[in-house]
Image (cartoon, coloured by chain):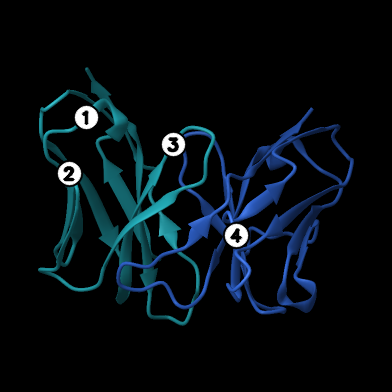
Chain colours: A blue, B cyan
Amino acid sequence: DTGVSQDPRHKITKRGQNVTFRCDPISEHNRLYWYRQTLGQGPEFLTYFQNEAQLEKSRLLSDRFSAERPKGSFSTLEIQRTEQGDSAMYLCASSLRDPGSNYGYTFGSGTRLTVV
Amino acid sequence: EDQVTQSPEALRLQEGESSSLNCSYTVSGLRGLFWYRQDPGKGPEFLFTLYSAGEEKEKERLKATLTKKESFLHITAPKPEDSATYLCAVQDFSGTYKYIFGTGTRLKVLA
């Protein structure tokens, strides 16, 4: 297992189009998180899954955003009717348990979305 | 509302010139404070978790400390490969799973 994989690495889309990103966590990790990061900012929490259950969603996750984690394995994040303000790096992270002493999230390298 | 402020925004050091990065936080009840390193074009990489005031963690040239209002990341005799953005994040006891991240400190170590 080489870590958290995200696909695609880069996506350019026209305003109004729908996009979908995929995240494959480390195989034994049951916890999965999505964050969004814009240039010069820290990551902002979007949503959290424990196994297949979506347990927390940020207010940032508008009706245009939806995330799934079928069967508690990979996850997808879909953005409908993209807007220029959606341009950002979308980061996925996973963990085996509550982050604790000497243990934290493992992040993927992200999907960079550019909406033109 | 939980808040994290990091300073300075950017820091340039000569190789071997030790310094400290600051993370000030406001949180209703601190469950954990986390330090991450982020290289350009990559996701953050976990460094440390701190839980309570007075706690210290060390890894190679990095040492993280925690008080009731702030955390410091001390970098001793840095090398060019320590150049990165260092992010601080907090999690509270409200039942949320989310981290609140600061905007980071961009560190450049010159050879």
Left-right relation of A14 to A87? right
Q: Say whether mark 2 and mark 1 are on the same chain.
A: yes
Where is mark 3, residue-wise?
B39
Count the numbered circles shown: 4
Q: Residue at x 30, y 72 (%)?
A: A101
* Residue A4 position by quadrant: bottom right
> Which of marks 2 and 1 precedes in the sequence?
2
Q: Residue at x 84, y 35 (%)?
A: A15
Left-right relation of B110 to A47? left
Q: Kindly identify the amino acid type of the residue bearing the numbered disc 1.
A: Lys
Q: Kindly identify the amino acid type of the residue bearing the numbered disc 2.
A: Arg
In 3D space, how far apart are the residues under numbered discs 1 and 2 (Cα atoms)? 9 Å
| Viewer-nearest of discs 1 and 3 | 1
Verify CB contact (< 8 Å) between mark 1 and mark 2: yes
In 3D space, how far apart are the residues under numbered discs 1 and 3 (Cα atoms)? 15 Å
Q: Which type of secondary structure does the marked residue at label 3 adopt?
A: loop
Verify CB contact (< 8 Å) between mark 4 and mark 2: no
Left-right relation of A90 to B20? right
Verify CB contact (< 8 Å) between mark 1 and mark 3: no
Crowdedness near tag 1: few (<14), some (14–19) or many (≥20) residues, C-alpha within 10 Å: some
Q: Residue at x 51, y 74 (%)?
A: A96
Q: Which type of secondary structure does the marked residue at label 2 adopt?
A: loop
Where is mark 1, residue-wise?
B79
Q: Position of residue A64 (x, y in %)?
A: 80, 56
